[in-house]
Amino acid sequence: MTVNPGEVPETLDEDLISPDSRTPDSATGFTELDLALVDALQAAPRAPWTRIGRALGVDATTAARRFERLRAGGLAWVTAYDAAKTATVAYVEVRCRPRAFDRVSAAVTALPWVFGVDETAGDFDLFLSVAAPDLPSLGRAVHGGIGGLRGVRSTRTRLGITLYGEGRDWRMRAMNPAERAGLGGPPGPHPRSYSTHLHERPGPQDQALIGALGGDGRLGYAELGARTGMSEHTARRRLQRMIRDGDISLRCDLAHPLAGLSTMVVYRTSVPHALLEQTGNALARLEQVRMCVSVSGPYNLLVLVWLHGLGAVDPFEALLAERFPALEVRDRTVSLFSRKRMGWLLDEQGRAEGRVPLGLPEL
């Protein structure tokens, strides 16, 4: 049976699911099979359910139904967004005035060009990921659109330069390497430079495809064409070309606190420039590292990690000291609550409960 991306078969063969993997773990909300399914979709976000099921040792119907349950519960979702080379990206630290925090946090979360919002414990209150078409627009958006909000005390901006690894590269690692290898999919983390100007932006039709897939990255080609006003053939051809040329990023996200990854830490680090690329590439391959990017400012490497609790912070930093003796950790900031990730609105357990479609600032 062949099942296209986005299609859910009508029957479910539960006999292929072991009792231990059928019932969600009360501590996580995910079964072992669920986590392996997420891992498979991280490797190949739009692979047919037949290929996903084969890698997991279940049939296509079981894989599709289980993912639909995860998606409906906000536990996992496939999304899409512009590739790094088409965006000007910065990371903004925001300090709020007393009693203004909730208002400011809600206001920035509603902005379509602020694609990530984390409430933090550290010397700033909010950690934002923002995008703009070019550097002047980025400056106006940050200083006016964020700095001008009532209740903002100060902002500090670090421009993204080279992305060594991000959410689309991160893996749950719930499958064994042989199972994952059978899925193919994109290569592992590799450096990608952010854009600083507008001319590399995708055209209107490609933007329409990215927008539709942002809400559901596994939409079938017929539905994708209907939502964007294209024929199924045109939607298929254009999307396959964007994937081949690296003009779109697809990834499977999950409610990480319910998957046992309760602690997110943002590290500001320094490394000698001669070792920057080597260190960035190696860091991006660590299982704890969710994002690694070189940035402007006095600390040239920004690293975001997901850990199994605060008790894992010291062992992780010991690992950094052992493997990267030239790397200096200048600051660590713990996320208290991830409110938004790639436009998706999250609850306190990390479950997706809505979405603000991604867009660029209009200034």
Image (cartoon, helix red, strand yellow):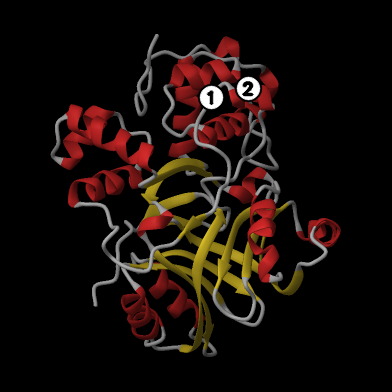
Report the Cα–Cα distance between label 1 and label 2: 7 Å
> Tag 1, which secondary structure?
loop
Q: Say left or right for 285 vs 118.
A: right
User: Height in image: 318 above or below 52?
Assistant: below
From the image, which quarter does the N terminus lie in? top left
Outermost residue, front side: 274
Residue labelled with disc 1:
183
Q: Is residue 343 visible?
A: no
Q: Nearer the viewer, residue 154 or 61?
A: 154
Q: Say left or right for 272 vs 336.
A: right
* Residue 88, numbered label: none
Give coordinates of residue 61: x percent, y percent. Answer: 45, 16
Identify the residue at image location x=44%, y=31%. Answer: 68
Q: Nearer the viewer, residue 322 or 110?
A: 322
Give coordinates of residue 299: x percent, y percent. Answer: 64, 76
Which amino acid, mark 2?
A: Glu
Badge 1 density bin: few <14, some 14–19, many ≥20, Cα 10 Å: some
> Tag 2, which secondary structure?
helix
From the image, which quarter does the C terminus lie in? bottom left
Quarter location, residue 110: bottom left
Identify the residue at image location x=37%, y=61%. Answer: 87
Give coordinates of residue 21: x percent, y percent. Answer: 66, 24
Residue labelled with disc 2:
179
Which amino acid, mark 1?
A: Leu
Q: Say left or right for 279 vs 2.
A: right
Badge 2 density bin: few <14, some 14–19, many ≥20, Cα 10 Å: some
